[in-house]
Amino acid sequence: MKLSGKKILLGITGSIAAYKTTYLVRDLIKAGAEVKIIASPSALEFVTPLTLSTLSKNPVLSEYANTSTGEWNNHVELGLWADLMLIAPATANTLAKMAHGICDNLLIATWLSARCPVWVAPAMDLDMFSHFTTQNNLNILKKNNITILEPDSGELASGLTGKGRMQETEDILNQIIDYFTKDKPLKGKTVLITAGPTYEKLDPVRFIGNFSSGKMGFALAEKAAELGAKVILISGPVNVMEKHSNINRINVVSADDMFYAVQEHFPQSNIFISAAAVADYKPENQANDKIKKSDDRLTLTLTKNKDILKHFGNNKSPNQVVVGFALETSNEQENALKKLLSKNADMIVLNSLNDKGAGFQSDTNKISILFKDGKTKQFPLKTKIEVANDILNEIITLIQK
Ligand code: CTP
């Protein structure tokens, strides 16, 4: 059985979709999972404890204590017991309470104690779902590693049609099976990625920047998360959004900001991919007031930024993998190899501005990967998502050696 031995803590909250969850309980049990259910008090207006306990083969918990027996329902133990906690359906109210830590029932208390991955399957009317408060709350949850099972569009209990229907229970079940059974080679690994440009401030309104779009770094973040990693994505100013809930994005502006953000997260990371186009220099002085035009010539003095890749390449522990990028316009291989050695990287991903479709802004890239042992692997022109996959596969081969 596909879910044999897996412990699922199922939270049910007060939505009409709660009746559908009874089918999910039945299917989880059929697939071999052990299921414990915590229902919010209002969920029990939609489904009875008897139905749920019969299907799950476990008592249904809802209150902190069972007043007739004097027993306490230990939310900490429950939170630690589960391999996966799923709240389905998750109402707008429960999502809001989760986002703000409002702990007024056993379900939220258990969630606050859970150390396992947590998924929510929102179910509500379309206007409630698209309301800015719900969307803000979902964003807070997503940023904090909660997986959102996006609701489907269709006919709603209100009679309106739109986005807000809880996903079909077969689809939820399949995602749970996938989660537990799919080969995820980066599961348990933390991948730290820098992406995008850095902006170096000249005065309150101007900066020195570059044309990096952040697409390559974001593609790496998405793929690494899909492969099971916990991703910390430190991004300069870009117009790209991260999607996967395993990505924790940290926004920075300057090379110095990026350095300190990497410094904070590097020790806990297994893999560091330096995909950002970090500015090599910054203005020596930042003007407090806007620089006025006066003379015909203006000379700026720039000072060198810290080389983030080099610093952490030289300070890595033997089991950390560090990967850099090189964007070259001439003597590509030779320059990239120099970078690999001087920055003490395990791999350098080389892209040449001479290749059509490679480099900044585009959705495609053509890379070669240089390794410490002097070997080079060349890849054809591909989308940045495919390129990200190739790079991560090489990293996986390296860590499995
Ligand atoms: N990099 C970095 N910090 C810097 C500059 C670069 O972490 N201050 C990283 C980039 O993220 C990339 C790699 O170093 O992974 C290569 O950057 P690149 O700018 O091509 O190389 P430089 O060392 O700056 O050399 P040059 O500009 O002379 O080519």
Image (tube, rainbow, N blue to C red):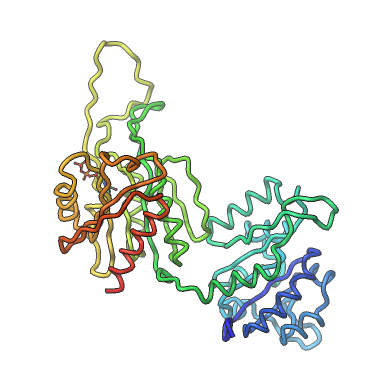
Left/right placement of residue 207 relative to residue 314 reads right
Between residues 108 and 23, which one lies in front from this camera angle? Answer: 23
Work out whether 147 lies above or below 126. below
Left/right placement of residue 141 relative to residue 385 reads right
Work out whether 234 lies above or below 111. above
The x and y percentages for residue 124 are: 75, 56
Work out whether 229 lies above or below 77. above
Query: Quadrant location of the N terminus?
Result: bottom right
Q: Residue at x 30, y 54 (%)?
A: 379
The x and y percentages for residue 90 are: 70, 63
Total labels: the figure holds: 0
Between residues 43 and 123, which one lies in front from this camera angle? Answer: 123
Left/right placement of residue 245 relative to residue 328 reads right
Task: Tell me the quadrant of ligand 1.
Answer: top left
The x and y percentages for residue 32 are: 62, 85
Q: Residue at x 33, y 28 (%)?
A: 202
The x and y percentages for residue 82 are: 58, 78
Q: Residue at x 25, y 50 (%)?
A: 350
Between residues 70 and 217, which one lies in front from this camera angle? Answer: 217
Query: Quadrant location of the C terminus?
Result: bottom left
